[in-house]
Amino acid sequence: MDKKIDKRAQKTRKALQNALAELLNEKVLRKITVQEVADLAEVNRVTFYKHYKDIYDLYEQMEKEVLSDLGMLILDYQDKTKPDFCSALIDYIESNSKIFKMIFSPYNTGELRDKFCKMVEGLFRLMQTEKNNTQFNDVKIDYYTTYQSKAFIALLEKWVQEGFSQSRDFIIKTAAEFDTHTEELIATLYN
């Protein structure tokens, strides 16, 4: 029975997170009420308070989960090719589409977006450092990986904001093409 309760609780938490994410596409966090989130998630306020203290607690828990999931994806990247990583990330974004629409929404505080960007930038820097046998704090690598990660994030942001209108394969191929050209440029600096 505990598994049934856990699944129900997980489903409720996911519904509340998706409701908050959806509302954050329309207005800023401080203007969202518990009642609005509960109504959109189709639960009552009591159920909301069983899981979260307030709207800010819901947002913080959602942020922690997303960053934890993304961190695991990034850690798993060490055993995968770049297209495999990109594919896994895009799968994660598609399965959490409402949350990513919120992350890239102009109404969001931008904190989660910034943390996501820093994680991707750190991964790209680590990859380039290893690939080019340089120091992690190499200035050229720092600038190029900043460029590379920002371009990648911009590609993802455009895809999300356009309602996932392009296929996941198109996004993966486009990201791979950008990466290939950027990596060729970086390689010329160290050969």
Image (cartoon, helix red, strand yellow):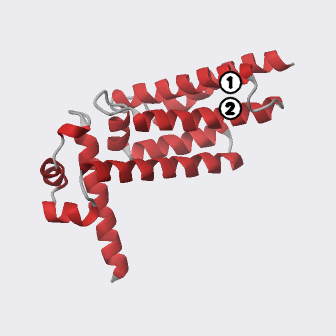
**Amino acid at circle 2:** Arg
Q: Are marks 2 and 1 in contact (CB under 8 Å)?
A: yes
Tell me the quarter of the picture where residue 164 sits: top left
Q: Nearer the viewer, residue 184 or 129?
A: 129
**Mark 2 / mark 1, whichever is N-terminal:** 2
Label 1 Cα crowd, 10 Å radius (few <14 / some 14-19 / many 20+): many
Extreme residue toward the right, this view: 191
Residue at the image position 65 percent from the left and 25 percent from the top: 145
Which residue in the structure is indicated by mark 2? 125
Tag 2: Cα neighbours inside 10 Å, few (<14), some, or many (≥20)?
A: many
Please identify the quadrant where the C terminus is shown: top right
Rounded to the nearest angstrom, the CA distance separating label 2 from label 1 is 7 Å
Quadrant position of residue 172: top right
Query: Does residue 180 appear anywhere in the picture?
Result: no
Task: Inspect this view and state whether residue 72 appears.
Answer: yes
Mark 1, secondary structure of its residue: helix
Identify the residue shown where x is 31% and y is 56%: 14
Horizontal and vertical percent position of residue 58: 30, 52
* Quarter occupied by the N terminus: bottom left
Residue located beneath label 1 in the image: 142
Where residue 124 appears, as percent x and y from the top left, is 65, 33
| Residue type marked 1 | Asp
